[in-house]
Structure formats: C-alpha cells, structure tokens
C-alpha cells in the first residue's frame, strides 16, 4: 500500500429492514453470489491493498460470522504478528451488550487502535458490496493533507423510496472537500452517497472518538462527522465502480440478481483484485437429463432435475423433477420438491418446499422463507 495502514470493519449495523434474513446472523454473514458472504468484500479489499492487520467489531448474532471468519486463514490473515482480530460487544464496563452507536464500538476496541504500529486506519462496514484497492484513495488522502477522507459514489436521489435506510449524503465542493452531511433525509437533494468507508490518521481517530464519547455522542455520521466538519479537513473520494447495498430484503435481492450480469460479475470477481472466501469442499453440481438452467449461478453440490432461470443457487440445493425456479435466491441445503413453482422468492438455509407448492413474490417484495422452514 502507498502508506502503511491497519483495518477496522464494523459488523454491527442496524439491519431491521432485512427482517428474517438477519434473525440469526449479521449483515456481514449474509450469503451472496452462490458461495460468498458479504464480509468477504471488505476483508478482501483490505487484503488486496496489503493491509495485514484487520479488526472486526461485532455487535449481535455474530456466531455465524465468527464461524465463517475462523482464524482468517482464507484471507491470509492467520499470522503470528498482526492478522485478524475479532471484537465482541462486551469490552467496556459501560456496555450492556449492544453498542449505542459506532463511536461506542470504536471506543470498545481503543486498545487495538492505540497499539497499532501503522500511521493510518482504513475503516469500513459490511453493508456495501464493492471491489476496490485503497492505494489510490490513500494517495489522494495524503496528497490533499486531509485528516479524514470519505469514500462515496454517485447515486441519484430517490424521493420517498421505502428502501432507503440510514443513508448518508455528502455535499462535496469542487476541491473535493466535504462541506455538509445529510443523514436520513426525507427528500434527498445530494447525489454523493457515502459508502461509510474512511481513511483517517490514527491520532486523529483516537482524538475524535475520545472527544465524542466524552460528550455522550455515540453516532458516527450524525455526531462525530457532522460536529467536526469545520474542525478538521474532511475530504471525499469517488468510487466509480459498481456498488451494491444491503439495506433491505429488496436490496439484498437486487444485489444477487445484479451478479447475473456478466459485466458486474466480472468487475467484482474476475478483476486483479480477487474476492476471497472460506472454501468448503463439495462435489460438482449435477444436472440430470430433465434439467434446464438459464442465466443462473449454481454452486457446488447442487442436484438439478427441474428448470432454473435467472436465479442464484447456493451449495447442496436440490431441485426436483418438473420444479420451476425463476428470479429467486435459494440458500444452502434447501430441497425444492417435484413440480414446485417458485418466482421472486428467497429461501434461507435448510428450507423444504413440498410437492406442487407455489411461492410467488415480486421484485420489490420477494417472498422470504426463514431458515429451516417447511412449506
């Protein structure tokens, strides 16, 4: 990397709009693209930027996330020095188990931050899906003399969008300096949408977190950033590639459907910046003579006897004879019996769909069957 940095990934976002999908997991542990998890993207982005010390801050429902991360070996973060660190929400005496905001979460791992030998910190969350090498952003940060740089992408404001959830928009001047911040606007007027990814000097981060925490201000964007916009030099850096969000069931559905586009899939997975994940060995997918598959992602271990169109199937999914699956996401170890008909559906892990059952949603309100469900 252009300058040495350590990483921090906040995996404690409020994700109520994802409903059943996060009952037993965090946003970062959400399966995506047939064999990946959402946290694979920020972790891989850091590793591809030669960041070898990464901390992951958890908040709730983190068992699945910790099982996936394990020792960090899949990302070459299982090391004697530096490597992967996982922080649970019980590090502060004042914390009852759930953080009151990201500032409190950062305060809870202040020992990790202070002990870091690197001069800079790259912070991100698990609610955005994108592929980036942070070198160019770091170079821009250093050359501009910024105290803190925010990554953003251009997104046209959508008025009254029910999918909008805890959005942050930036007012960026011609010189790249952040002049204002809008948080959860009812009528967005700005197009620079924060990706909640930052580069900041370690000493500046320590000062800002300690100052906000001392004042009882626990929200990062609403309190820490807005209250210091005139006190520090806050710059913005634009990401011009694909950006997917994990804000609601509808947005989770859209991101997975986006991966069926070869251009988007190529940008995310076949560029020089690879996306790494925990590998689970399995036999290849099996297609019988009655199978018909079109424009779909099918993971290892699947047995396809029916018809699959415009869908994403995770590991060990069975599609029975004459079953039809269209525009759907089927998570691991799910069984769809003969003559079942699914369209615009999201089936969580270990779901059983009986013969001749019909499940139909739509692109904005896909039908969700919770983990272990029987239909």
Image (tube, grey):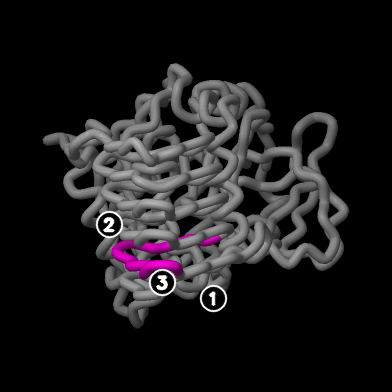
Q: Position of residue 128 (x, y in %)?
A: 54, 47
Q: Residue at x 42, y 21 (%)?
A: 1
Question: Residue 354 vs residue 15: left or right?
Answer: left
- Foreground: disc 2 or disc 3: 2
What residue is shown with label 2? 333
Answer with left or right where residue 160 lies relative to residue 142: right
Q: Is residue 350 magenta?
A: yes
Residue ID for mark 1: 216
Looking at the image, tell me whether mark 2 or mark 3 is earlier in sequence order: 2
- Secondary structure, mark 3, is loop
* Coordinates of residue 248 in the picture (x, y in percent): 59, 63
Q: Nearer the viewer, residue 224 or 99?
A: 99
At 45% from the left and 21% from the top, the residue drawn is 270
CA separation, marks 2 and 3?
Answer: 13 Å
Q: What distance separates the C-alpha of mark 2 from that of mark 1?
A: 46 Å
Answer whether residue 289 is visible to the viewer in this image. Answer: yes
Q: CA distance from mark 3 to mark 1?
A: 38 Å
- The answer to whether residue 95 is magenta is no
Residue range highlighted in magenta: 345-356
Marks 2 and 1: which is nearer the front? 2
Residue plotted at (85% across, 61% down): 159
Q: In what quadrant of the picture does the C terminus appear? A: bottom left
- The foreground one among 86 and 321 is 321
Q: Position of residue 342 (x, y in %)?
A: 51, 60
Point out which mark residue 370 bears. 3
Q: Quadrant of residue 300?
A: top left
């Amino acid at each position: 990397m252009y300058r040495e940095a350590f990483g921090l990934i906040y995996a404690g976002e409020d994700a109520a709009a994802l409903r059943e999908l996060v009952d037993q997991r965090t946003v970062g542990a959400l399966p995506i693209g047939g064999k990946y998890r959402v946290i694979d993207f920020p972790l891989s982005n850091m590793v591809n930027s030669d960041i070898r010390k990464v901390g992951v801050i958890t908040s709730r429902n983190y068992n699945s996330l910790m099982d996936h991360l394990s020792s960090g070996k899949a990302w070459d973060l299982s090391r004697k020095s530096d490597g992967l660190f996982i922080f649970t929400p019980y590090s502060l005496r004042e914390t009852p188990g759930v953080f009151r905001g990201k500032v409190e979460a950062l305060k809870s791992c202040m020992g990790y931050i202070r002990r870091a030998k690197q001069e800079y910190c790259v912070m991100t969350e698990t609610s955005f899906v994108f592929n980036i090498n942070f070198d160019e952003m770091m170079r821009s940060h250093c050359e501009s003399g910024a105290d803190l740089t925010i990554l953003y992408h251009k997104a046209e404001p959508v008025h009254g969008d029910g999918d909008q959830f805890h959005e942050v928009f930036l007012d960026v001047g011609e010189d790249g300096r952040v002049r204002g911040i809008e948080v959860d606007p009812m009528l967005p007027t700005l197009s620079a949408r924060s990706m909640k990814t930052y580069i900041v000097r370690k000493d500046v981060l320590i000062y800002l977190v300690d100052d906000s925490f001392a004042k009882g201000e626990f929200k990062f964007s609403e309190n820490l950033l807005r209250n210091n916009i005139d006190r520090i030099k806050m710059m913005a850096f634009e990401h011009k590639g694909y950006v997917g969000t994990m804000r609601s069931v509808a947005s989770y559905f859209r991101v997975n459907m986006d991966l069926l586009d070869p251009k988007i899939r190529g940008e995310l997975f076949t560029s020089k910046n690879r996306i790494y994940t925990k590998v689970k060995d399995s036999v290849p997918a099996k297609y019988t003579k009655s199978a018909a598959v079109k424009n779909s992602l099918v993971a290892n271990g699947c047995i396809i006897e029916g018809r699959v169109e415009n869908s994403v199937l995770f590991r060990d999914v069975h599609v029975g004879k004459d079953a039809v699956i269209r525009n759907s996401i089927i998570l691991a170890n799910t069984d769809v019996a003969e003559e079942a008909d699914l369209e615009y559906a999201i089936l969580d892990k270990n779901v059983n769909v009986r013969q001749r059952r019909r499940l139909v949603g739509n692109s904005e309100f896909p039908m969700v069957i919770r983990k272990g469900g029987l239909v």
